[in-house]
Amino acid sequence: MKSIGHAALEASKVLSKTSTATKNAALLSIANSINVHREALLDANIKDVQKAQNNGLDAAMLDRLTLNDQRIDAIIEGLNQVAGLPEPVGNISELEMRPSGIQLGKMSAPIGVVGIIYESRPNVTIDAASLCLKAGNATILRGGSEAIESNRALGDCINIGLASSGLPSAAIQIIQTTDRAVVGELITMTEYIDVIIPRGGKSLIQRLSKDARVPLIKHLDGNCHVYIDSEADTQKALAIAINAKTHRYGVCNAMESLLVSAAIAEDILPSLIQKLIAKGVEIRGCAATCLLSGDVLKAAESDWSEEYLAPIVAVKIVSGIDEAIDHINQYGSKHTDSIVTENQATGHRFLVEVDSSSVMINASTRFADGFEYGLGAEIGISTDKIHARGPVGLKGLTNQKWVVFGDGHIRQ
């Protein structure tokens, strides 16, 4: 691990001065290599999936692990988008003249070496690698053991892309062992690594928060809400709630809790419940929701804070906007929450008072995604409040340094 860390540190010095053209060429070459080696990548992924099935991996994790042609196309498109994004490094902003005569500004700069620890999603390997490369950072990637064959195959494609552009192979390193002791080493190597970005479940985040000596940008769970206001458009509400819950289950931006204003509950909830049940979704509701349908199971207190990552949703009828906001801020995970309303003032109040990394009006929570936000890809969705919040793309992988322009100025 120390050898990997040292190599990454040396590679970061090269990347910090690499041209935009070279970085983009490497990204496009990686995309081409993935396309050329598509079958080998799918074969490697099949090995991972079969092993995971034999080990009893749950459905949500299996969904995240599985690659197919459509998902590989999305990975390739993400690489192309990152290559097409503006250069994030070296930009000078907030330039101003000071009374002393010096000019002062801020320049965007790479973070340096980024370590990323994540679970079963092979696409994270490429998303993380591409964004860190474009931002001028060296990357050490430690994926989950369940995706080791897929990540090795992706690593081969990455190495081809780096070599074709003359960049050091240590610019993006994928740890080849599944030994969990590696994580303990990675999170304490302050002499080599500038920041760790973990993506995974609560147990992983809790462990790293306790043991890490390297600073963290955390990407935690998503208990996302949709609140249907008393002044909601019924058709919009139905479409948004169904999409937010059923578009994909095993993702952090899926709706896990549905709140409905009491003023509109009897008009919209029976139909919505039946539509969700028809799609195989289990409904766990408050006492008032249970009275509207015999198909609803009574929710426990724990359901209000649960990230199911499954075809299950918690439903609560609330008195109005006040209770909805209070409920979200108490039970939510500060990830993504949406209101459906035609009242502009109510919508604005929701935006201001809900304390989450993404807050929406009349849109599905499924849009909380780096690709959909035009970031090309994302490292993850940060629920932290310092440095980066929400989908973390290129800007979240840079920092700023003060720059001063003088002409022989001395301080009097």
Image (cartoon, rainbow, N blue to C red):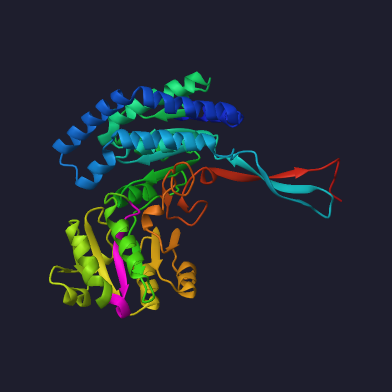
- Residue at the spot 58% in from the left edge and 40% down from the top edge: 88
Q: Is residue 39 above or below residue 318?
A: above
- Residue 12: x and y, percent? 54, 30
Q: Is residue 347 above or below residue 278?
A: below
What span is colored magenta in the figure? 252-265
- Residue 223: x and y, percent? 32, 59
Q: Is residue 264 magenta?
A: yes
- Residue 185 in view (yes/no): no
Q: Is residue 161 left or right of residue 211?
A: right
- Residue at the spot 32% in from the left edge and 55% down from the top edge: 254
Foreground pick, 341 / 4: 341
Q: Residue furthest front?
A: 235
Q: Is residue 220 above or below residue 155?
A: below
Q: Is residue 280 magenta?
A: no
The quadrant in which the N terminus is found is: top left
Q: Quadrant of residue 157?
A: top left
